[in-house]
Amino acid sequence: MSYDSYYSDYDAVFGGFLIIALLVCLVMALVYYLISALIYYTTSKTNGFNDLAYIAWIPLINVYSLFLLTANSDDDATIRSSALKNTLIYFGLFIISFVPVIGIIASLVMAGFVLYYSYRLLYRWSGETGRAVLYVILSFFTGGLFFAVYGLMRMNQPFKA
């Protein structure tokens, strides 16, 4: 008795591996989200943004915490308006990234935007430009693992710069 089927056993194995890989990626994304939210929350509390620290735990809006921590001004109202402006630019780029052709450019600009503000956050933690550039490069090549480890080490300390 022969069953002539289009699908083979290898297709089922490949599908199983694909589902497992997808689940692993989802779990890793959740863990990275929790770690980054903890870093932004604790850093916000440490550096004087107690009233807005909770924003770090809200998905998609937690990028406001990054922009708030990296704003360079002495006036609290200016810092908050600058962070809000950068957040609106980020969300505008996020929406444009779904447009077919322009979306590729918007996604690249959005990635550059996040890399630049990650540099500014790492600069504020380290206090040195050269170290901050090195830390951004290490974070990029390790897929954000260096940022998570360094952020967990520095989140309870006030900014140097």
Image (cartoon, rainbow, N blue to C red):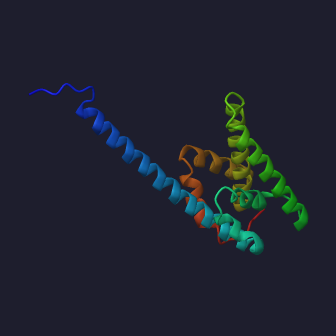
Left or right: where 67 falls relative to 16 = right
Quarter of the image containing the C terminus?
A: bottom right
Q: Is residue 53 left or right of residue 82?
A: left
Residue 91 % position (x, y): 74, 48
**Going 58% across and 65% down the picture, which residue do you hit?**
152
Residue 19 vs residue 110, the one in the foreground? 19
The image position of residue 92, as x and y in percent, is 77, 44
- The residue at 73%/44% (across/down) is 113
Q: Residue at x 56, y 54 (%)?
A: 146
Nearest the eye: 63 or 8: 8
Q: Is residue 99 above or below residue 141?
A: above
Q: Is residue 1 above or below residue 20?
A: above
Relative height, residue 142 to residue 14 (above, below):
below
Residue 18 at x, y percent in the picture: 38, 41
Q: Nearer the viewer, residue 106 or 131?
A: 106
Quarter of the image for the N terminus: give it.
top left
In percent of width and height, residue 109 lies at 73, 38
In the image, 75 versus 95, the foreground residue is 95
User: Taking 2 as reference, is 123 above or below it?
Assistant: below
